[in-house]
Image (tube, grey):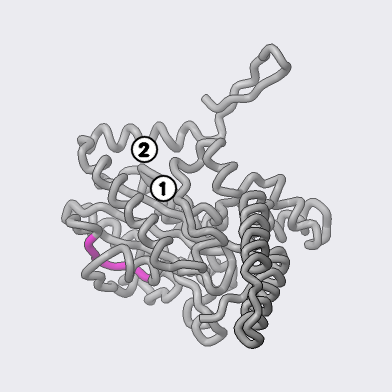
Amino acid sequence: MELQPLDFEKPILELQKKLQDLRSHSDEHDVDLDSEVEAMEAKLTRTRREIYDNLTAWQRVQIARHTQRPFALDYIERCFSDFTELHGDRLFADDRAMPGGLARLGSHRCVVITHQKGRNTKENVMRNFGCAHPEGYRKALRLMRLAEKFGMAVIALIDTPGAYPGIGSEERHIAEAIAVNLREMMHLRVPIVAAVIGEGGSGGALGIGVADHVMIMENAYYSVISPEACSAILWRDRRHAPEAAEALKLTAQDLLKLDVVDEVVREPEGGAHRDYDLAAANLGAALRRNLEKLLELPTEQLLKRRYKKFRALGNFAEGKSGTGTSRSSV
């Protein structure tokens, strides 16, 4: 699969082309250009490191949305075994934007709930661009209750711009479906691990995101609103999306500092789309490690920790420090 570079990656692409030209010229004309090749390789390494070590919030949003980025089913294939998809909410329909089912994570049986996007127009229409309807969240709740009944952990892989806001979705009460999930997940008597693997948009993400341990991939984002929508509201112009992305503090690194997420999972240099297997290996190891820890906790302690974790979100104390006013979460 030929990688599609993003705008900020063009300097890397140009250097790669120059390096290839040098090597081709050396082979075709039997000329010793080893020193020039080594210098170009060093420059390419420096440039790549400078770009990827200093990504802006907007650039990380672009990576999170990359069409070649691994999606939920790609991770399920690599991180889980014996996956069996279960369909339908038993009320209205089956939502293809939110596949889920039974699987094994290491030696543990679990229920996996995900958002799934498509890579082309046909797939995106089938998956509704990863935007779930009410029946998707009700299917997710049905599977979570199944997990609770049989004592299986719940693993949620989040990757959605948001829940579908269309008329049919509103007619079937999308807000109510998400709200019920938030309430029921808080009381679910089995361990829950959630991972934001791409986009984590608003209530659509939170509808399966109430978990004992919340992880996020290094170049994913998690936000109450998209940068474009925020820009349209604040500046009445979507062109200010990069500034909105910075202000929203939606990157994995910002969210970890704010205690919104518990862990950042490393990605291959340049993004998960550069190496599916390495990205999946990192995510799978983090899922297994954290699930093992949660399984050791008594159920009542698990529920108290989950409640305390989400009650603490957004609580801040103003205080004076030696250098001025400071803010810290409490």
Q: Which quarter of the figure has residue 297?
A: top left
Nearer to us in this view, 207 or 172: 207
Of mark 2 and mark 1, the one earlier in the sequence is 1
Left/right placement of residue 142 relative to residue 160 reads left
- The magenta-colored residue range is 99-104
Amino acid found under the numbered disc labelled 2: Arg
Where residue 84 sits, quadrant-wise, is: bottom left
The crowding category of the residue bearing disc 1, from other C-alpha atoms within 10 Å (few below 14, some 14 to 19, many at least 20), is many
Q: Note whether 203 is above or below 35 in the view shown.
A: above
Q: Which mark is residue 306?
A: 2
Residue occupying the point 77% across, 59% down: 232
Would residue 216 be counted in the magenta stretch? no
Along the viewing direction, whichever of 267 and 211 lies nearer the viewer: 267
User: In this figure, which residue is indicated by the disc labeled 1?
Assistant: 210
Q: Main secondary structure of the magenta part?
A: strand
Assess disc 2: are there few (<14), some (14-19) or many (≥20) residues with their C-alpha within 10 Å of its C-alpha: many
Q: Position of residue 203 (x, y in %)?
A: 53, 55
